[in-house]
Image (spheres, rainbow, N blue to C red):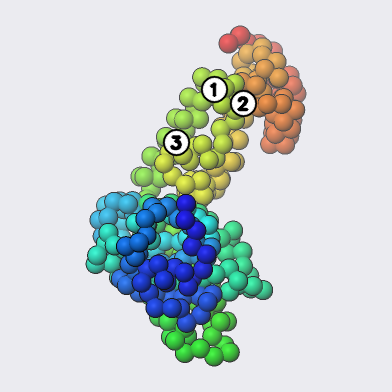
Amino acid sequence: MHIIHSISEYHRLTSLPAPAHPLISLVDVSKIRFAERVIWEKFSMTFYCISLKKNINGNPKYGREFYDHDKGIMSFVAPMQLLSLDTVSPDADQLATGYALFIHPDFFVGHPLAAMSGNYAFFSYAVNEALHLSQTEEENIVALFEKIEQEYKNRDEHTDHIIQTQIDLILTYSNRFYKRQFATRKKVNHDIIDRLDGYLTEHFNAGEGLRKGVPSVEALAGNLNVSPHYLSDLLRSVNGLNTQQYIQIRLLEKAKEYLSTTELSVAEIAYLLGFEYPQSFNKLFKKKMNISPLEFRKSMPVQEIKHKI
């Protein structure tokens, strides 16, 4: 995997003029063209990229659904995120226009945005989870990019602070627009959750925990072909829970079923659910249920019929 170490190096590789500032650059995406000498397919950059592309309607790699807006498409890249050439270069989208803003982390030293990728989960979304804007949303974002462009070309002692403010607004708006996108993709969202439920049901009913352990967020997201952060944000938009919390709820439901309908020991149940150590299961159960597994079992009606599985 190739690593692009600076914004200046990116400009050289994509046939762009040298950036006016080593830590930040705003470019026209229609002018980004990787040089013919580039032979690597995967690469990472040591800086952020926030882009707004237009005129790429219908391109399947952006994961559009028929009810998505057909205006600008925004994507967000964090430092050292694995990329492929067609996710950044518009070579495959000859009519693409828009902006790409490249920002080195050092540009935010001493500013709250220094923790940008940690505070905005969409920096970890996959390319097919891009943000599709309505006309009004696009106009808002374009206005902010144009303000950055104005400051970028006419620098003075206030420029960096003004640009940081515009970036903060872009991210805040993007957070709002993603929440709107989750709301308008209800059918797709519920289809993903239904598949998630089916996977967890099969996992716990088949005793897969003995072989695979407790399902991880990463494994579930991979099975559903979405990124881990996107899956958590999707679930949170629907039921207020992230993926880890959702897994725990489903796991505890199965645990209560075992405790109330079988004579399996607590340790056996823990192993069936995927815990390496029964103590970990006991700790989670008591933390979430405010009662130990044994106390829960004792609270079940005496006439409850139990069976071995």
Whichever of labels 2 and 1 marks the residue nearer the N terminus, that label is: 1
Assess whether mark 1 and mark 3 are in contact (beta carbons under 8 angstroms).
no
Labelled disc at residue 253: none
Q: Mark 1 points at which residue?
A: 208
Q: Name the residue under label 2.
A: 274
Which is nearer the eye, 129 or 297? 129
Q: Mark 3 points at which residue?
A: 223
Amino acid type, mark 1: Glu
Measured Cα–Cα span from mark 2 to mark 1: 7 Å
Residue drawn at x 46%, y 66% as measured from the top left: 49
Which is nearer the eye, 45 or 231? 45
Measured Cα–Cα span from mark 3 to mark 1: 15 Å
The crowding category of the residue bearing disc 1, from other C-alpha atoms within 10 Å (few below 14, some 14 to 19, many at least 20), is: some
Numbered circles on residues, count:
3
Where in the figure is residue 284, as x and y percent of width and height?
A: 70, 34
Res 187 → quadrant = top left
Residue drawn at x 39%, y 78% as measured from the top left: 17
